[in-house]
């Protein structure tokens, strides 16, 4: 597989408002002083695009946002990071999707989420020529787009020689296999977390859940497992890739960073295991600061971190 010069990240675009640290919410109209409040681009399309751009891809995002000030800010944050937003459509009747994330001292991140314009993105908004011209399509939030929509876009990409990856956005407890099964036969790399594997398949353990996803048509699974790292699962077997040990500030965007690192490395011709190493490395770099855009790194720096950690 050749180096990926152009990637389209399609799906969820979210403006995150992150507050750190938050141990508890003050009662009534009380006030608590915090160390940081930041706003960043995020989501399984926009957040993944941030890391793709850092690694050196020419990356475009495609999705829906509102015509509100939050949408203006989201676009400006992506463009400042080197992401082409020309495929993003604006919907005047809905708000830009946003999340408020009170970050706990240990890096955990409960979420207050507004679905917003992400649900308004339709097949009529898709620039099919851009998908066909790309070397890779990353579809972030397949279940949010709907099974028929997702399958049509992924099938079109594959028919035009574009490789594909899929990430999920819903928590495992909100997922069912029928939401994603039609898309899996057109998916080269499926990139869920362990909770999503269990929730979407109804399996009692990760191994059984991964087998069900492979049986449904997915080409290769790279499953993130939090502090336990990742597992790469194919029809030939399973490989565990440990996480890097870092001081975690915030886990927001780590899964999206892993997705970008894994896919980018596959585009360089690296093995699935070595690709997961790069995915873990960029996730670890992002986890050391606040927000999906944390970390001033490129491919060389990420590889150097992986060798030295």
Image: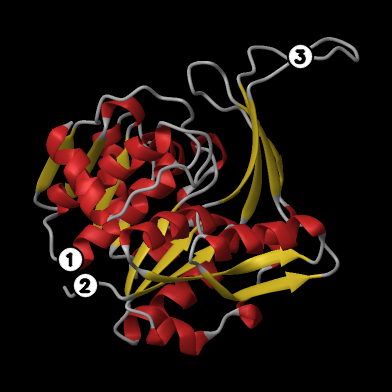
- Say whether disc 3 or disc 2 marks the residue closer to the N-terminus: 2
- Say whether disc 2 or disc 1 marks the residue closer to the N-terminus: 2
Could you say which disc has been placed on residue 268 in the image?
A: 1
Q: Secondary structure at mark 3?
A: loop
53 on left or right of 205? right
Q: Secondary structure at mark 2?
A: loop
Mark whose residue sits in front, 1 or 3: 3
Q: State yes or no: discs 2 and 1 in contact (Cβ < 8 Å).
A: yes
Q: Which residue is identified by label 2?
A: 3
Q: x and y percent of residue 215 in the render?
A: 26, 55
- Say whether disc 1 or disc 3 marks the residue closer to the N-terminus: 3
Residue at the location (55% across, 62% down)? Answer: 80
104 on left or right of 259? right
Residue 48 seen in render: yes
265 on left or right of 246? left
Residue 217 seen in render: no
In-front residue for pair 44/106: 106
- Image quadrant holding the N terminus, namely bottom left
Mark whose residue sits in front, 3 or 2: 3
Please rate how many residues cluster around mark 2, counting C-alpha atoms within 10 Å: few if below 14, some from 14 to 19, many from 20.
some
Q: x and y percent of residue 143 in the render?
A: 54, 56
Residue at the location (79% across, 12% down)? Answer: 26
Q: Which residue is identified by label 3?
A: 32
């Amino acid at each position: 597989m050749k180096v990926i010069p152009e990637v389209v990240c399609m799906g969820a675009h979210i403006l995150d408002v992150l507050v750190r640290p938050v141990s508890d919410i003050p009662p009534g109209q009380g006030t608590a002083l915090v160390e940081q409040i930041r706003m960043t681009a995020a989501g399984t399309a926009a957040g993944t695009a941030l890391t793709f751009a850092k690694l050196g891809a020419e990356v475009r995002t495609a999705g829906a946002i509102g015509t509100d000030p939050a949408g203006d800010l989201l676009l400006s944050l992506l463009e400042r990071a080197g992401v082409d937003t020309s495929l993003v459509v604006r919907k005047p009747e809905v708000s830009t999707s946003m999340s408020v994330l009170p970050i706990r001292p240990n890096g955990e991140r409960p979420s207050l989420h507004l679905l917003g314009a992400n649900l308004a993105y339709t097949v009529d908004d898709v620039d099919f020529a851009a998908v066909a011209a790309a070397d890779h399509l990353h579809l972030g939030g397949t279940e949010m787009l709907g099974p028929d929509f997702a399958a049509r876009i992924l099938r079109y990409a594959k028919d035009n020689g574009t490789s594909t990856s899929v990430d999920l956005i819903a928590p495992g407890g909100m997922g069912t296999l029928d939401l994603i099964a039609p898309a899996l036969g057109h998916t080269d790399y499926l990139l869920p977390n362990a909770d999503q594997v269990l929730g979407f398949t109804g399996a009692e353990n990760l191994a059984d859940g991964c087998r069900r996803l492979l049986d449904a048509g997915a080409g290769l699974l790279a499953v993130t497992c939090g502090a336990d790292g990742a597992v790469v699962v194919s029809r030939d077997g399973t490989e565990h890739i440990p996480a890097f040990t870092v001081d975690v500030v915030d886990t927001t965007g780590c899964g999206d960073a892993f997705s970008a690192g894994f896919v980018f490395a596959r585009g360089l011709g690296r093995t699935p295991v070595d690709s997961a190493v790069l995915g873990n490395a960029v996730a670890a770099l992002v986890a050391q600061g606040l927000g999906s855009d944390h970390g001033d790194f490129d491919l060389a720096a990420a590889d150097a971190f992986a060798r030295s950690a």
